[in-house]
Image (cartoon, rainbow, N blue to C red):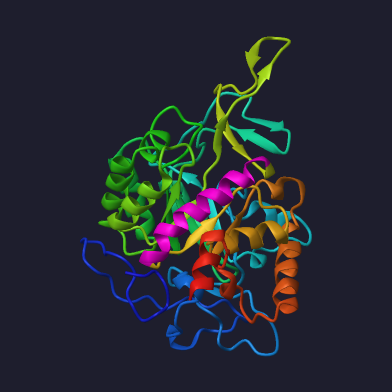
Amino acid sequence: MPCMSSGQPPRGGAAGGPRGPQEPRALPGAQVLPGAQVPPGPQDSGATKDPAAEGGSSLHLNFCGLDFATPLVLLSGCVGFGEEYTRIEGFSNRDAGAIVLKGTTGKPRLGNPPHRVYETPAGMLNAIGLQNPGVDHVVRRILPQLDFSETRFIANVSGSTVEEYVEVTRRFDQSPIDAIEINISCPNVKEGGVAFGNYPDMSAQVVEACRRVTTKPIITKLSPNQTDIRENARRCIEAGSDGLAVINTMMGMAIDVRTRRPVIGNVQGGLSGPAIKPIALLKVHQVYEVARRHHVPIIGQGGVTTATDALEFILAGATAVGVGTALFYDPMVCKKINAGITEYLHENGLRNVTELVGTLRTAAEAAVEKVD
C-alpha cells in the first residue's frame, strides 16, 4: 500500500496485518493538509501537495503520513540525538522536515577505536562504530528532552542480530518517536548492518521482523555496497517498508604513507560528502524505478551541500533529501538550501516541491513522450 496521505493506511501493522490510517502531524504554524485526501504528486511519488498554499511555492509535503515542513532531513550520526546543533546561534530544527537520531542498539556501545573520522578530497571517512547509550537510555532520558513541536524525529535502529533489531524497534514503538529508520547498511561495524544490508534475503528478513512489532512508519536505509540495489529495494518494500533512504555511505579507507598504516582505526569506514553524490543520484534513480510502482517515497542522500544538489535528487525520484556531512562545516546550510529550492519553484511557476519528484527526463522517456 502507498505510504502517503491518500486515505489509504500505511503498510502492515504490529501483527503483520494492515494498520489503521495515520493523520499527519502538523507543525505549529504550518498549513495542515485538510483530511490528507489530496492525490499523490507526479509519477506517484508518495508525496502530497499543500493545497492551502496560496500566492507562492511551498516546501511542505507528506512523507509516510507525517507532515514535513521542508523536504530536508538531517541524517543519522550527523546531529547526535537532535539537540547538539541547537546550541549554535541561528540554527533551528524547524528548518528540517525531519531529524534522524543517532543509531541506537539494544545495549550501550563504546564504538570503534580511534581514529574515527578523516577528511578526504571532497568527502569524509567515518567509522564511529555505532557508539550510543543503548535504547533504554534513549527512550527514558533523551526522547523526553526533545521538542516534538519543532520537527519530526525518526529513530535509527541498528543491531547485530535480527532479534536485536526487533527488540530496539519494539521499544521505539512504545515511545513518542515519529518513525523508525532501519539501519541495515552500516559499513563501519564488523558485524550486523553491513551483512544484512548487502543481501536481499537478509534485508527482507530484518524488515519483516521489525514490521511485526511496530505500527510506526518504517524507512529502510539501503546500502550502495551491493550488487543490485533495485532487488533489495523491492524485497524490503514487499517485507513492509513504508519508505526508503538511499544511500548510506560508501565503503572506503585512507592510508598514512609515513607509518604504512590505515588512518582509520577500524581500517575501513563510510565515505560521505560530495565525492559520492554521482553514485547516490544513480542509486536513487534506480530505486525510484521500483519504488514508484508501489508508491513508496524515498529520502535521497549523499553529498548534498546546495539547493541544486537537493533539486537533482528530487528530480531523480526522491521525495525528501538528506543533509549530513555539509552540516559539519556549515550548520546553516539548511536555511540556504530551503531558500534556493523556494526560489527555483518560484522561477519555474511551481506551487509545491512535490511537483518535481521523479520528473527527470531521460532519453528513453523523452522518446516515449514524442511517440505519444
Q: Is residue 21 left or right of residue 264?
A: left
**Residue at the location (58% across, 89% down)?**
52
Q: In x, y percent, where is residue 237? A: 34, 57
**Extreme-top residue of the structure:** 259
Position above or below: 18 against 183: below
Of residues 175 and 364, the one drawn nearer to the viewer in this rendering: 364
Q: How many marks?
A: 0
Q: Is residue 217 left or right of residue 308?
A: left
Report the quarter where the N terminus lies: bottom left
Residue 210 visible in the current orientation = yes
Of residues 160 and 333, the one drawn nearer to the viewer in this rendering: 333
Q: Is residue 285 magenta?
A: yes
Q: In x, y percent, where is residue 64? A: 43, 68
Dividing the picture into quadrants, the one containing residue 318 is bottom right
Q: In x, y percent, where is residue 244? A: 44, 56
Residue 141 visible in the current orientation = no
Task: Tell me the magenta residue range.
Answer: 275-294
Position above or below: 234 against 152: above
**Residue at the location (21% across, 66% down)?**
17
Q: In x, y percent, where is residue 106? A: 38, 41
Of residues 137 and 297, the one drawn nearer to the viewer in this rendering: 297
**Residue at the location (56% across, 68% down)?**
359
Label the magenta part by its dominant secondary structure: helix
**Extreme-front residue of the structure:** 371
Q: Is residue 315 magenta?
A: no
